[in-house]
Amino acid sequence: MRLIEMSWGEWEGRRLDELRVELGENMRANEALGLDFTPPGGESPRRVFERVKGFLAQVAATGEPTLAVTHRGVIRSIFAHATGWDMLGRPPVKLDWNAIHVFKLRADGTPAVDHINFKLPLKARGETMP
């Protein structure tokens, strides 16, 4: 449960561009909250990180390399905390959703960026060169 996607509440399944048009200034004001942006009945990126940080601390305590496959909202929340990005404006690095993002964990589970947008070789992805 700790790695499930951010809850979008009443906006589940909706597109941000549509919500921006429909909600106008209210949406802009909500987005201006950065880490505290919260859909009605949903959760903020800050709350997502609160949910995930116990998992990160548990992984850090093992000292073992760990692979976690999760959703964009979770990755963005971890990335924000690893880089100090408040989710206002553009991220320090544009995340490629067709790549792997690697984080190192301090002893308490605090994330730090190791590699962002790491691409696997084509053969590892099951693709071939043209």
Image: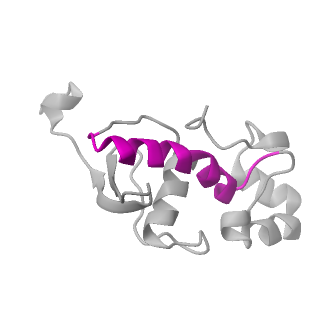
Q: Is residue 54 magenta?
A: yes
Q: How many marks?
A: 0
The image quarter in which residue 31 lies: bottom right
Taking the spot 46% from the left edge, 47% from the top edge, the residue there is: 56
Which of these two is toward me, 27 or 52? 52
The image quarter in which residue 123 lies: top left
Q: Is residue 62 left or right of residue 54?
A: left
Which quadrant is home to the C terminus? top left
Q: Is residue 52 magenta?
A: yes
Q: What sort of colour scheme is used for the picture?
A: one colour
**Which secondary structure type mostly characterizes the magenta part of the structure?**
helix
Q: Position of residue 37 (x, y in %)?
A: 74, 62
Which of these two is toward me, 108 or 93? 108
Taking the spot 80% from the left edge, 52% from the top edge, the residue there is: 39
Taking the spot 15% from the left edge, 39% from the top edge, the residue there is: 121
Residue 124 vertical placement versus 97 (above, below): above
Q: Position of residue 89 (x, y in %)?
A: 58, 75
Which of these two is toward me, 59 or 91? 59
Q: Is residue 44 left or right of residue 125?
A: right
Q: Position of residue 126 (x, y in %)?
A: 21, 24
Q: Is residue 113 left or right of residue 32?
A: left
Range of residues picked out in magenta? 42-65
